[in-house]
Image: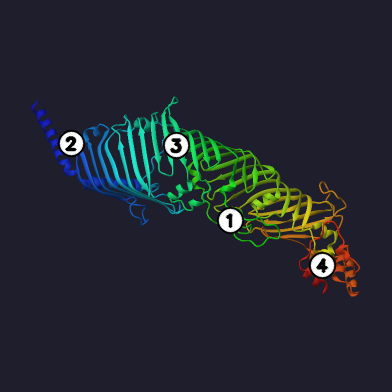
Amino acid sequence: MRKLLIALAVIVGMVVVAVAALPFVLTGDFIAQRIAAVVKERTGRDLDLRIASMTLFPRLKAAVASAALSDVPGSGRPPMVEVGSAELEMPLWPLLHGTVELERLHVDGLRANLVADTAGRGNWDFGGQESGRAAPPAGPAGAKTQELPDLRFGDVRIGNVVASYTDQRSGQSIALSDGSLVVAMPDLDTPANIEGHAAVNGRALTLTAQIDSPRALAAGNPTAVRGQLASDLFEVKLDAKPEADGRTGGPLTASVPDLPALAGWLGVPNAGTLPVRTVHLTGRAGLGGPQASLDDFNLMLDDAKASGAVRADWSGKVPGVTLRASVDPIDLDRFLPAPAPARGVPAQGSGPGSADAGWSDEPIDVSSLRRLNLDAVVDSKGTRIRGIEIGPTRTSIALRDGVLAVDVPDLSAFGGRTSSAVKLDATKQPASYALKMTANGLQAEQVLATFAGTNVIRGTTALDIDVTSAGGSQKALVSALMGTTHILFRDGALRGINIAAILRDPVAAATGRLQAAARETDFAEFGGNFRIDHGVARTGDLRMLAPIFRVEGQGTVSLPDRRLDLRLDPTVTSSLKGQGGQFEKAGVTIPVLVTGSFGAPSIQPDFSGVALSAIKDPAKAAEAVRRLKEGASPADILGGFLGSGNSGNSGTADKPAGNLPLPIPGGQLPPALKDLFGR
């Protein structure tokens, strides 16, 4: 027994010595160094923590002289977070039993410098900056929420808060000053009250909130929550209570009477150009576990209305959003810049924004598609854009694991109907795209004016498109475009040339004696199949059916260069009916060349090709030489080739012949013909 007592005495003595020595071992500098080491390991940042004083018994008291957390390494910017001074006081014994009783926390002078760089990454994002430390594995979906320690707050005050936010991409800048936050929460099971005030870019901002049970809210269990965030430019209110389904829910309202003023206050560039002035949102908010919802919402942007329900779930690796919405008829022109005037043929140059302005090589960033899963169905009751009426439409959007699929099975627009499906895979480098689209009855003139800046063709259109591409910019996508396209125009006209008139009187057209030409070719059908290889569409089966002639053609359309190189071979026929006609060359053929840029295409007959083809016939060549020696004009000789020569009678120019032929610029023979006849 005596030895046991001696042993106990020794143990007690050692504990007393250890406790007595503990304040000398756990000095402020030692603790600051250990905390800084942990912060460095977890974030890759430097923490400069200076503890002025610290006591452990019987209460933990600490006075922090200053603290500073560095910005992104190598940025050259000041610390991201700085603390002027802080005082903390809490009993030690409850802490050993898992209860945090924060009796006193005063922070005086908190400064935050937040910056989003040109890539959109915030300096508060510590991802990938840990020093070789692997990220903890994500827990399984639906895993039980980790229980919080027992928290009890006494006198918690944070004053003299100054913060700034700068977005280097947009130039947006927000400055917060004179900020203060007061939290009154005796423990996690009694009501908590929060009050905050600050001046944001010179305007007052206030926050008030009451939470009946902080523990229940943190665990995802139902409890009452009331709050308001407001300034003189906006107001958001929430009044939620426990609901029968086990969630916290209640009415949510948000109103912005002057959105441009609010955006300008928050430093948004060009805020005065925003097309919306008023915003009003109402709905029933819900919160339960790792999920939030807004049911029966009604959103008004000025007079534009939308309603529906939206839910968010952040239990998985990436958050997921589900949206079901209905949008009333809306005029989108108010949200778009003024359109450039559509040009006919010929075009007047190609300035910026025209069809010849070129494809942009600015990078297209689709990385954000990997950060969210989305399941959305939007029913539109009608849309107006660029003067085009779009009927009721249902759009389905599915985004999962970086793959986006957009499906519009039936869209009424441009006087016809379309069905389209788009797929974008952002998991690949570069991202890949696929488009499948069918359309019928579209008004070609409206479609071309809207998307190509020209109106060279009118009539109804049928389309069948199946294309794929991959790239990181507009230019790269167009240059990598692959697939097939079938296009057919019906009951319309090709503007810029009158093929029928040229065939009726080719000599007059070639010599320019007919000046009052209707620069348009009517047709019953015009179209063909295109195979696209790296942005160049090739066709060998262009067909045009017109009342008195047929056209066959071939050539290329280079999308990367925005240029045309097509050859059309029209042939006079005996049939006066276009559709259903046979492709039999019953008469003369005069090639038509369609070349040049999209914005300023050149559509001209190729008379030199006719002459060069004709002299391959020895009999016609000998006849031409004989007539030239007898003093016949080149025009008469050309007429002989074409089967429409005249004996010096130029009165043909005064005879109406239905559609008048296209005048040849300058009223002269093409140089190739002059060289051919030596005149």
Tell whether 303 sits left or right of 141: right
User: For the residue marked with disc 2, what is the amino acid?
Assistant: Pro
Determine if residue 331 is in view. yes
Q: Which residue is mark 4?
A: 511
Q: Is residue 60 above or below residue 116?
A: above
Instruction: Give the mark nearest the N terminus, 1 or 3.
Output: 3
Q: Which residue is mark 2?
A: 58
Secondary structure at numbered mark 2: loop
Q: State if disc 1 and disc 2 touch (CB < 8 Å).
A: no
Q: Which residue is mark 1?
A: 475
Quadrant into which the N terminus falls: top left
The residue lying at 74 percent from left, 50 percent from top is 527
Residue at the limit of the structure toward the left, as seen here = 2
* Spatial separation of the CA atoms under disc 1 and disc 4: 43 Å
Give how far across and how far down residue 468 sits, in percent. Answer: 62, 48
Secondary structure at numbered mark 1: helix
Q: Which mark is residue 622?
A: none
Instruction: Give the mark nearest the N terminus, 2 or 1.
Output: 2
Front position in the image: 11 or 561: 561
